[in-house]
Image (spheres, helix red, strand yellow):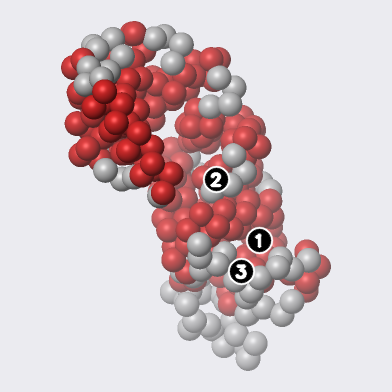
Amino acid sequence: MGDGNGALAEYNKAIELDPKSAYAYNNRATVRVLKGDVDGAFADFNRAIGLDPKIDVAYNGRGQLHYRQGRLKEAVSDYSRALALNPSLAPAYAGRGNALLKSDDLKGALADYEKALRLDLGDVPAYLGRGYIRLFRGELDAAISDYSAAVELLPSLDEPYYGRGLAKGLKGDMGAAVADIYAGLEATAKASGVAAGGVRDAADAAGRMLADLTKYIARHPSHARAYGVRGLVRLTAGDEAEAGREFRRCQELDPTLKAEVEHAAREVMARSRKPGGPPLSVGDRIEKPLPVLITSWISPAGRSTTPTGRRSTGCCAT
């Protein structure tokens, strides 16, 4: 915060010395964005554009603000103006791609992400956006490649771990999916200062992943593993009842996945026993005694039993 205040003071001084410097207003707007002063940033971007209608970076910055405020049409308009002035401005392509993606224009978004990456192979938002589209379309290897590139470029960011985890699970590697989901939780926790595995983090992350999986399932309703992966996500958030329903739907579509899903569910349950603690070895995770509920989650409705032989009336009974 101290550095931000110092930079703000310097740009205030620069504007006093030259009130017609469009770049001074643009730079002060950028500092105000970092400090959370949205109104002040808008005012400065507008002033910069008023002084110099050809200042591409100010249109790009104002486009980012419009996007964050949910004004997608205005965001697309500003990004397009920036690109008309400077066709080599990679962040504007990625930004416009994000706005188009939220507007459900997947074709336009994909074209923009690919243009951004042709200009800058280090553009993390473009990898994330393209990875999401590829995941949604079922192009799982390509999605994993994009998310892996984002992880390599910015390993502290949680989003690519979540996306890659979903893609790996949908492809059939549920163990790797669980590992990536928990890597994402650790990144989320480090960014927020909360211990990894905290309920709030798990719930927030689960909400983001569930939204993506629900869209995927709407497009691929017969993909059995999609329900299994969605069950694992629900389990990380502690929603055992809904996880059980997802696991049973997965098995109804493909009974051969029972062992695979049970194995992954055991991974989640074992990890959840030590939130924030060191990861258990693979052997420990598999051999550790776990609730008999796991078996009832995977079993078809009406057939799960307790150790005494009676039908379970636990979280997943129907």
Residue carrying label 2: 157
Residue carrying label 3: 276
Query: Going from the N terminus, do you reach mark 2 or mark 3 first?
Result: 2
- Amino acid type, mark 1: Ala
Q: Quadrant of the C terminus?
A: bottom left
Above or below residue 73? Residue 273 is below
Residue carrying label 1: 264
In this rendered view, identify the residue nearer to me: 80 or 306: 80
| Residue 58 point in image, percent of width and height | 31, 22
- Element on which disc 1 rests: helix
In this rendered view, identify the residue nearer to me: 55 or 243: 55
Question: Within 10 angstroms of label 1, few (less than 14), some, or many (20 or more) residues?
Answer: many
- Amino acid type, mark 3: Gly
Q: Is residue 111 visible?
A: no
- Amino acid type, mark 2: Leu
Identify the residue at horizontal 28%, vertical 10% (top origin): 54
Query: Going from the N terminus, do you reach mark 1 or mark 3 first?
Result: 1
The Cα–Cα distance between marks 2 and 3, rounded to whole angstroms, is 18 Å
Query: Going from the N terminus, do you reach mark 2 or mark 1 first?
Result: 2
